Image: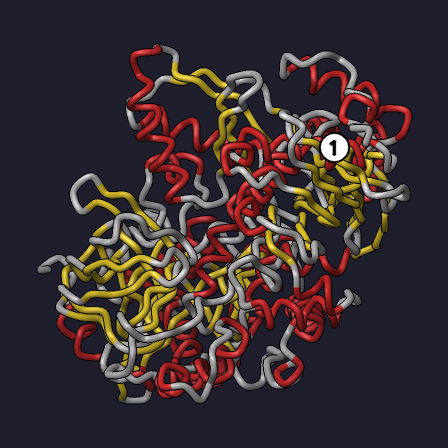
């Protein structure tokens, strides 16, 4: 405990919600979040002022330091005195690379405010828009810091007036995004303004920063800042050092947190309806709105760490009640109970043991081994719905086959994979039954590269294949024939199904967890009716698998209940590895129209019912003009005018499509879309063709049909990789005559 002088102060301040600020630092990759965090930690006495900016304290993993890139979100608590009052700031530094955007989504659930960091030269980039959109979706209030102002002066040599014009452009762009994504009641009052001190600017590397109130208080002007960067190199060093002493960066930033970001008391009432579907007038609902430390416990888990000593440690926001050692709790989603063994406060890589953490704070707890990210930890014996699911901006779209180099390492392989997928829910792992391959899916090449490095660190040597793209299978139109019949292998039972294509609105509602298998039937029925479904179908959804839905239309038949679980399993098998290339199905509505079940239980086990379910689904699928869908990336590149041609050539060569081209001073912003399959190795090619002058970013955009002329070849390649016959089966192979 001695290492952090402030721990006793922090524990005291935890009990006063009005002086707590839960905040996250969000930005595009390389815009300076972690360097900025160093300045704040130095001010709190956690690191020395000399090393701030170089230490990158919250990038605690060796590879993060080596690559100078944040991979994991990192929590730390610090105190700050503002206008004579002590405040507690619970800070989360988040990654900026799109491959790790899942960590940003998870962190934003735990905070009420976010500091958006923007590089003064590059301006708001694709990922800036993405993280700001994610924050506003979670009803997290933004403020702005324009970083790397020294580059505008040293590299671009702007005058004071030009610097201000550059700032104005950045502010307008950020406010446009706030206008676009903020909740309706906050579109205006969340706009960032220079006048009231919600915008700061400075250089995190050179440790100085200002906002308008601080400029006035210290009597500094833009001319003074530009003067600090003019003269001989040693003279500049001295003047910049003086500037950092006169206008230390941490002052305006920490003051902004205290003055302009909401406390849990202010934020929880308006965030509540967005993130928790429970009744606001229930005991838990009222306790959440009041941030009552003595109310029923309600905590949302946002991060999992698997520690060799403490076991599974769950970190998350306590919205109501308190977490305390020895408390028995319920895990709402997984319907389990457990006892909290230890309560901690997260201080980057350290965990400080505390007795309890009350509502309004971020806590870490251990002793609940089967817990997962997104889980709702609640008071035992109190009925409560779980928190809304976390809405990720991207799907895992790149896969590698992975296996241990030595077969003796299989037990270690199993243990390491379990640890990695528990800590990172955006990593998907499965075994391909046909080929026997272990497949690991992630958000992109870098995500999988980092995962392979983590395996190596755990003492596991693995072999990885080249990246494999994950496709989806869908139908072009609803199935148009009479219901398709499936017979059990012993011919004693029969099932009739029809197949429809789900609308984009329903698919989106499933993807964003507005429609789930876990919610009540009435709630799901209301949403589906609003999306155009009939009352009967909306009421009778019995299974949801990824973006596919099973509807039970069967009436007045015997023994249906006895076989329904097997039918659901058959449906899940059918859509999990569909028939064209054993890729997951996308956007299917499977309707059970009629059934005849043998009266003898011996004849209606899973071996009979499963094939009777998947065979007619695949038959109807093949009769509905099936299509293969490929993942598409949206691509944005900021490039000097003289290098535009190579960028356009590169996009076109990779089957990309130019969507827009926007002029911005001497730069051009090229917006395009290109398939994930064509994106591998694009970084090196872009660097060499633009002499390193291009800034770009990609993110998952949508699923789009593989071009007609390529579809058969892509299917053949996937099937051959999986050890299947090169051409998909014909519908006749699954058709059953009466």
Observer-nearest of 405 and 509? 509
- The answer to which quarter of the image holds residue 342 is bottom left
- The answer to which quarter of the image holds residue 84 is bottom left
Observer-nearest of 243 and 593? 593
The residue under label 1 is 618
- The answer to which quarter of the image holds residue 111 is bottom left
Answer whether residue 446 is visible to the viewer in this image: no
> Who's the residue at 39% across and 59% down the image?
375
Observer-nearest of 466 and 179? 466
Residue 133 image offset from top left, x and y in percent: 62, 64
Residue 285 image offset from top left, x and y in percent: 41, 83
Q: Which quadrant of the figure contains the N terminus?
A: bottom left
From the viewer's perspective, is residue 240 above or below residue 275?
A: above
> Who's the residue at 70% across and 64% down the image?
538
Mark 1 burial class by Cα count in 10 Å: few <14, some 14-19, many 20+: many
> Who's the residue at 50% across and 78% down the image?
271
């Amino acid at each position: 405990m001695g290492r952090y002088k402030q721990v006793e102060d922090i524990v005291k301040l935890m009990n006063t919600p009005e002086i707590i600020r839960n905040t996250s630092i969000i930005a595009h990759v390389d815009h300076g979040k972690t360097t900025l965090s160093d300045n704040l930690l130095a001010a709190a006495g956690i690191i020395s002022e000399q090393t701030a900016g170089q230490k990158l304290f919250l990038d605690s993993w060796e590879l993060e330091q080596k690559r100078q890139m944040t991979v994991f979100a990192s929590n730390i608590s610090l105190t700050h005195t503002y206008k004579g009052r002590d405040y507690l700031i619970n800070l989360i530094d988040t990654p900026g690379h799109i491959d790790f955007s899942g960590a940003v989504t998870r962190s934003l659930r735990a905070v009420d405010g976010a500091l958006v960091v923007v590089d003064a030269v590059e301006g708001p980039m694709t990922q800036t828009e993405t993280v700001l959109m994610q924050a506003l979706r979670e009803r997290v209030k933004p403020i702005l810091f324009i970083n790397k102002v020294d580059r505008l002066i040293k590299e671009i040599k702007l005058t004071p007036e030009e610097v201000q014009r550059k700032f104005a452009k950045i502010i307008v762009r950020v406010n446009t995004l706030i206008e676009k994504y903020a909740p309706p009641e906050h579109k205006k009052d969340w706009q960032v303004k220079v006048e009231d001190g919600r915008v700061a600017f400075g250089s995190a590397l050179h440790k100085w920063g200002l906002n308008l109130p601080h400029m006035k208080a210290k009597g500094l002007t833009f001319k003074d800042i530009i003067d600090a960067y003019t003269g001989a190199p040693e003279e500049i060093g001295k003047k910049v050092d003086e500037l950092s002493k006169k206008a230390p960066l941490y002052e305006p930033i920490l003051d902004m947190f205290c003055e302009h970001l909401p406390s849990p008391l202010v934020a929880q009432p308006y965030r509540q309806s967005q993130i928790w579907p429970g009744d606001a007038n229930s005991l838990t609902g009222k306790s959440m709105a009041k941030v009552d430390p003595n109310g029923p416990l309600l905590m949302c888990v946002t991060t999992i760490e698997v520690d060799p000593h403490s076991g599974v440690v769950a970190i998350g926001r306590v919205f109501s009640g308190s977490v305390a050692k020895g408390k028995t709790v319920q895990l709402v989603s997984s319907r389990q109970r457990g006892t909290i063994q230890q309560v901690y406060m997260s201080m980057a890589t350290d965990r400080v043991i505390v007795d309890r953490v009350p509502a309004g704070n971020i806590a870490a707890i251990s002793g609940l081994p089967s817990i997962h990210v997104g889980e709702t930890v609640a008071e035992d014996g109190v009925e409560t719905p779980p928190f809304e699911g976390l809405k990720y901006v991207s799907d895992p779209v790149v896969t590698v086959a992975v296996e241990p180099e030595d077969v003796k390492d299989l037990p270690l392989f199993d243990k390491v994979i379990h640890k990695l997928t528990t800590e990172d829910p955006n990593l998907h792992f499965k075994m391909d039954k046909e080929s026997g391959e272990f497949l690991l899916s992630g958000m992109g090449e870098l995500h999988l590269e980092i995962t392979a490095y983590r395996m190596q660190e755990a003492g596991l040597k693995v072999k990885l294949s080249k990246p494999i793209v994950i496709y989806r299978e869908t139908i072009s139109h609803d199935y148009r024939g009479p219901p398709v019949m499936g017979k059990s292998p012993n011919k004693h039972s029969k099932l009739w199904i029809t197949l429809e294509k789900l609308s984009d609105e329903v698919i989106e509602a499933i993807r964003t967890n507005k429609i789930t298998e876990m919610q009540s039937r009435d709630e799901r029925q209301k949403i589906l009716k609003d999306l155009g479904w009939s009352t009967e179908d909306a009421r009778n959804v019995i299974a949801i698998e990824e973006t596919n839905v099973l509807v039970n239309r069967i009436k007045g038949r015997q023994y249906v209940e006895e076989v329904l679980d097997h039918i659901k399993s058959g449906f899940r098998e059918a859509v999990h590895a569909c028939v064209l290339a054993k890729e997951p199905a996308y956007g299917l509505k499977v309707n059970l129209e009629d059934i005849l079940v043998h009266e003898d239980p011996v004849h209606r086990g899973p071996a009979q019912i499963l094939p009777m379910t998947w065979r007619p689904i695949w038959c109807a699928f093949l009769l509905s003009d099936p299509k293969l869908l490929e993942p598409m990336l949206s691509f944005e590149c900021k490039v000097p005018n003289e290098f535009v041609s190579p960028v356009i050539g590169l996009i076109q060569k990779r089957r990309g499509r130019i969507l827009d081209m926007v002029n911005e001073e001497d730069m051009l912003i090229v917006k395009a879309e290109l398939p994930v399959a064509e994106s591998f190795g694009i970084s090196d090619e872009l660097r060499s063709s633009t002499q390193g002058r291009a800034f770009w970013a990609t993110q998952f955009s949508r699923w789009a049909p593989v071009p007609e002329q390529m579809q058969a070849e892509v299917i053949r390649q996937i099937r051959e990789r999986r050890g299947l016959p090169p051409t998909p089966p014909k519908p006749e192979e699954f058709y059953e005559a009466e």
